[in-house]
Amino acid sequence: VEARAGLPSSKQLSTRRVSPQRYPLTSGFMMRAFASIAILLVLAPARGDEAGSIVGARGGGKTLVSAAGTAGASDLSFADATVAVFGGTGIEGTAGSSDADLLDEIIAAMGPGKDTDFFQQRTTEHLPDTRMSLAPILAALPRNAEGKFDRSAVRYALHHYFLRSYAWRLQGLDPVASLWNSSSPSAAQVFHRLPVNVRDVIEKRLSSSGLDSNGVVALAVTLWRLIHNEGTNRLRLVYKLANTPEQEPISESDAQVKVDLYMAAYISGLDLTKIDQSKLMRYYRRMDKATSKWHEVQAFTRSNVKAAGARSATPGLFEFHDVARIVETIEERFGHWQMTECNEFKEALVPMEDQGTGRVRIGDFYKAGLNERWQFSESVEYLRDLGALDETSPGNKRVIIVNYITGASNCFGTTKYHEVCCISECESLLAHLERQFAAPSVSPEDIATVVAAMPSATVPAPRTLSNVLLHRLQVIAANNGGLVPLAGRLFAQWMHHAYPRECPYPHPANTTKPMNPFAWKASGASISSKKEMQELAGRTHRKQEPVQMAPWVAKEELPASYVAADPRPPAFWAPIQFVVAVASFSVVLFRLARLVCHAACGLRGSSRSPRKGGESGRAHFAV
């Protein structure tokens, strides 16, 4: 250290006189010593909470920091991500300071009673599955300065959770047509079924510092239970319209009829509070004409009824709560079951695709509709509001295949609070990225590597990404601090260009107004026009026209605020930091004291020793 700082060694100090002109280097050493300590403390500040996990970023393929602030290898597993988000025991935070008790607060606000006991039992049973499903989604979302998720990030997580798990689109959670960061989970229509005091508990948590991971899970299971409670109430109306007392056990065949009536109303979007028995039966008898899949639906529901009957404590008889459980099971499985029809739409549209763009010319779309494909008959106006129409070139309107398939026109079950719709195949691709990175923001190089090796139903892998795709990924990163936010609109748009038949095109906010067919008809607009279909289907176009690619709108929209990744270490490092800092400072003081001591000894020794040439010190000073 002495040699590096330019200081004389201790041995040199003891054998020669120290000149005041040479000693200023000691103050330089002191400055360097104190600077070293300061750098140590600044680079590794203590952290006792989750604030260091504001964003979590992964770069260069070396290290990643998850949304829970956990560093690990680049191949962080799903189980690791779950532990990172929820903690090793599944409980995040400490009692009294986290949202682990949010569900208890909700239950307490509901008050005592059989309904509350049933709510508590079912939500508690559902917690582990919900936690596992939400873990990768939450790991890919940014946290605020308090280490929690803002209300818009919570909305994003809940929307994708229900869509992936059950194909449910909850009214008020779907970000389509609105700003990605403008809504709150409390905007979900089903929340209005809760008492005011319960809603106040939830809103208070959301409007303060946000929710931690367990708070999001508590909110998810609450919404899940509310949806099922609403289904049970619809079943009660079916019993009432069929003049069947709820207290009376029914046979398996009667149970199947009740389930069929329930599904007829569910698929047709009927409000059972506004119809009588004759109207319900009329819809029921016409279901085979309303949907070509009715017989398949009946086969699906009957298999569930038979399975429930085999498990029943009273074989051959079904209590009301037994039928209610069957309806719950059907609602949870129905979305994934009806994906076969969604895939049929895709199989019909892809062969008509316009040069690999994920789009079908409007004329070709209507030709298929006129040839017995009754699904492809929506009007241009409806397709536009739906977000399924590409009008980049006004003279060449095209239907965006994936936006049409996942649009509200193809939702197969509709209630006041949610719809059952086709699940975008992009959800599985995004889920893979979330599990792979477990971070809100990722370097463009890492994304390109993983996406190039990630196949879809129509995109083979491995493949070489085009220079345009790579450049756009770099531009997204350049506008977001060098990293790509996985939950942003621009990345969703990039995924549409990378997987044009699987990932929907994300229209900028407030440019579409999607409605299901029932709401569209109620507004007085026409959902289809045969004259319009025939006119557009009859138009011709050149076979060798230039390829018109999907548009690129450079407008970012994020579900929450992204802050630069925090490199600070976890809280357990704080006491170690303190000990190291004190030890370093003590060493510096000890060495400094030793230098001063040697300097003083050297000065005293030089005053007594004879000068070179035989002259004494006294004679020298006399001169």
Image: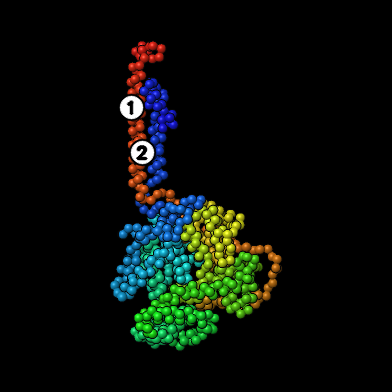
Location of the C terminus by quadrant is top left
Residue at the disc numbered 1: 597
Any mark on residue 501, and which? none
Residue 383, percent across and down? Answer: 57, 71
Residue 489, percent across and down? Answer: 52, 60
Which of the 4 quarters of the picture holds residue 165?
A: bottom left
Q: Is residue 542 visible to us here?
A: yes
Badge 1 amino acid: Cys
Count of residue discs? 2
Mark 1 vs mark 2, CA separation in Å = 20 Å
Q: Is residue 493 visible to us here?
A: no
Disc 1 crowd, CA 10 A, few/some/many (<14, 14-19, 20+): few
37 sits left or right of 526 in the view: left
Badge 2 amino acid: Ser
Q: Is residue 548 above or below residue 537?
A: above
Residue 566, percent across and down? Answer: 43, 50
Residue at the disc numbered 2: 584
> Which residue is painted at 50% across and 65% down in the image?
427
